[in-house]
């Protein structure tokens, strides 16, 4: 994907499903939020944006 500026990335952190083969939990879905994809690697990016 292409973005016009870094502000478009804030608040759109991807969420991925962890595979059953990794967790060994067949009847439970585990999802993880990929905070490392935030523009500055911080969970506070959205808060910082609101301060502007």
Image (spheres, rainbow, N blue to C red):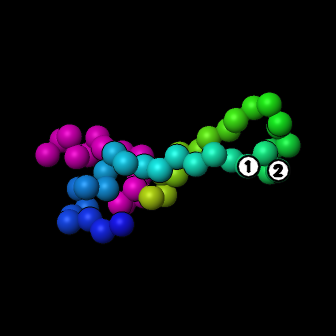
Instruction: Answer above or below: position of 3 versus 29.
Output: below
> Mark 2 and 1 residues: CB-CB less than 8 Å, in contact?
yes
Toward the bottom, the furthest residue is: 2
Residue at x 29%, y 40% (from the top left corner): 47
Q: Is residue 30 left or right of residue 4?
A: right
Q: Secondary structure at mark 1?
A: loop
Question: Which residue corresponds to mark 2?
Answer: 21
Dot 1 alpha-carbon crowd within 10 angstroms: few under 14, some 14 to 19, many 20 or more = few
Report the magenta residues as a range: 38-52
Toward the left, the furthest residue is: 52
Q: Secondary structure at mark 2?
A: helix
Residue at x 31%, y 56% (from the top left corner): 9
Q: Is residue 20 left or right of residue 14?
A: right
Question: Which residue corresponds to mark 1?
Answer: 19
Picture coordinates of residue 38 (x, y %)? 40, 56
Name the disc covering residue 51, or none. Answer: none
C-alpha gap between disc 2 and disc 1? 5 Å
Q: Is residue 38 left or right of residue 15?
A: left
Picture coordinates of residue 6 (x, y %)? 25, 62
Picture coordinates of residue 17 (x, y %)? 63, 46
Would you say residue 19 sits in the magenta stretch?
no
Residue at x 82%, y 37% (from the top left corner): 25
Residue at x 31%, y 51% (from the top left corner): 10
Dot 2 alpha-carbon crowd within 10 angstroms: few under 14, some 14 to 19, many 20 or more = few
Instruction: Answer above or below: position of 13 versus 41.
Output: above
Give residue 26's quadrant in the image.
Answer: top right
């Amino acid at each position: 994907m292409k973005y016009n500026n870094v502000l478009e990335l804030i608040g759109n952190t991807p969420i991925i499903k962890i595979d059953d083969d990794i967790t060994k939990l067949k009847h439970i879905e585990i999802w993880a939020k990929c905070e490392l994809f935030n523009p500055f690697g911080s969970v506070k990016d959205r808060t910082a944006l609101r301060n502007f």
